[in-house]
Amino acid sequence: MSRGEASPDTSAGVLYALGAYGMWGVAPAYWKALDGIPAPEILAHRVLWSMLVGVLLVVATRAQPQIRAVLRSRRHALPLLLSAALIGTNWLVFLYAVETDRVLDTSLGYYINPLINVVFGTWLLGERLRPAQIAAVLLAAVGVGQMVVALGTLPWIALVLATTFGLYGLVRKLAPAAPLVGFSLETVLLAPVAAVFLYGLHAAGESAVAEASVRSQVFVVCSGFFTAAPLLCFNSAAKRLRLSTLGLFQFIAPSMAFLLAVAVYDEPFTRVHGVTFACVWGALAIYVIDSARAARGT
């Protein structure tokens, strides 16, 4: 193999990364197909079908010993309760945003997420910020701040998505579990609440899924696979690519969501939005360049 030629493992990693972030990028279109079904009901079904997929994958990969090991360790089991609550909240807010035609806010949230991670690393892990990282965080804060002043409202959807996903990653980092094991246990922990909620809807005759078209019901059933597939692709990519390389792919999903919101769903993109996104994009450019230099040790 020539020096400039990518190894088969690296090429496969790139394809897995594109698959993961590509699926996350089209997520708004997937959930838009369930228009008319309330976000809490979609979430409950998503949890249950995701649990089924997770359990089947655990059995198929013979990961039961890993499940038992996590459950026997209080250090690993208790944080999974928190991570389950965080990812459940993240999913619910995302579904609500799609349902209420605020996909643009989800894009902003996941653009902000890497910068939120930097802040959490400083506040909670005692990491020291480099000057460029400080500049990036401040520039993003200016962008969000001017939106608050101009519109008189906090972009709470973007901030909740960025914060819950950032905290979720932090919890999983401090109490690590294999991605499939963690995913399966989180959905198992959320499943009782989801099941009780759906039972109540059915008992009251208020289930939107029961009255939905066959097409929508198929999308609901497939939501477990749609939730698990990008996670598995991401895990496969992480094993084959350097973390700095993988990090460059994380902007694919919010960019696709941005294009869907503006070009497909005709969500309003005002001058205020333009200033906010310009600040955040500028902050991310600083962040990426600084991260690349740090990875090279320059």
Image (spheres, rainbow, N blue to C red):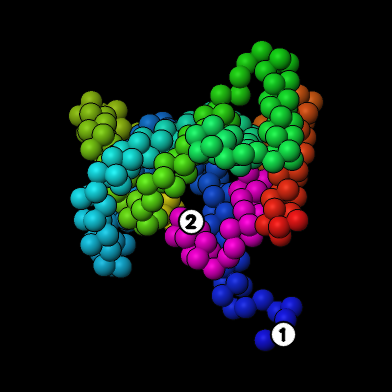
Whether the residues at callouts 1 and 2 have beta carbons within 8 Å, the answer is no
| SS of the residue under disc 2 | helix
Question: Is residue 126 or residue 53 the one in the foreground?
Answer: 126
| SS of the residue under disc 1 | loop
Q: Give the residue type that dot 2 points to.
A: Pro
Position in image of residue 44 (x %, y %) = 33, 38
Position in image of residue 2 (x %, y %) = 72, 85
Q: Is residue 210 visible?
A: no
**Which secondary structure type mostly characterizes the magenta part of the structure?**
helix
Quarter of the image with the C terminus is: bottom right
Cα distance between the residues tagged 1 and 2: 32 Å
Q: Identify the residue at image location x=22%, y=33%.
A: 196
Question: Is residue 91 or residue 219 the one in the foreground?
Answer: 91
- Between discs 1 and 2, the one toward the N terminus: 1
Q: Identify the residue at image location x=67%, y=57%.
A: 295
Q: Is residue 23 left or right of residue 82?
A: right
Tag 2 residue: 230
Judge whether 200 appears above or below 69 on screen: above
